[in-house]
């Protein structure tokens, strides 16, 4: 899968449904999948092309949807999250 076609959509209203989010993103091209993580306030939208994804990201990031200001970014592959320095666990 081309990761540049998959978008992270954050700050979602907890009541947002996948069909409504798909309808919003369809304005900018074909949506191939939508996955909202219930109770987490974010989800993922995959577009048919990277050009459609870039257009949707540029147009929708920071816009209001269902009472919340959306955060739309290119999705990062799993495991790319910086961990920072962690100290080993010690009981003493």
Image (spheres, rainbow, N blue to C red):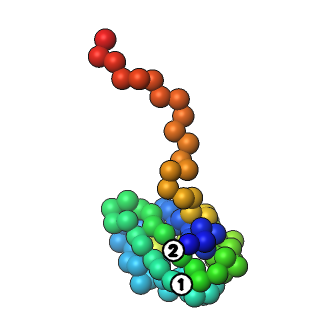
Q: SS of the residue at dot 1?
A: strand
Residue situated in front as seen by the camera: 72 or 47:
47
Residue situated in front as seen by the camera: 42 or 51:
51
**Seen in the image, is 91 located left or right of residue 11?**
left
The answer to whether residue 60 is above or below residue 89 is: below
Q: Which mark is residue 48?
A: none
The residue pinned by badge 2 equals 45
- Across and down, in percent, residue 40 comes to 37, 59
10 Å crowding of disc 1: few (<14), some (14-19), many (20+): many
- Across and down, in percent, residue 54 comes to 68, 73
Task: Locate the C terminus by quadrant.
Answer: top left
Q: Residue at x 35, y 71 (%)?
A: 15
The alpha-carbon separation of the residues under discs 2 and 1 comes to 7 Å
- Furthest toward the left, the residue is 91
- N-term mark: 2 or 1: 1
10 Å crowding of disc 2: few (<14), some (14-19), many (20+): many
The reply to whether callout 2 and callout 1 are in contact (CB within 8 Å) is yes
The residue pinned by badge 1 equals 31
């Amino acid at each position: 899968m081309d990761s540049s076609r998959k978008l992270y959509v954050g700050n979602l209203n907890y009541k947002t449904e996948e069909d409504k989010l798909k309808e919003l993103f369809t304005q900018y091209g074909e949506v191939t999948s939508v996955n909202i993580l219930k109770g987490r306030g974010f989800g993922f939208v995959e577009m048919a092309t990277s050009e459609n994804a870039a257009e949707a990201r540029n147009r929708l990031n920071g816009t209001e949807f269902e009472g919340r200001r959306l955060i739309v970014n290119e999705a990062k592959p799993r495991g790319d999250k910086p961990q920072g320095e962690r100290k080993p666990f010690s009981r003493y």
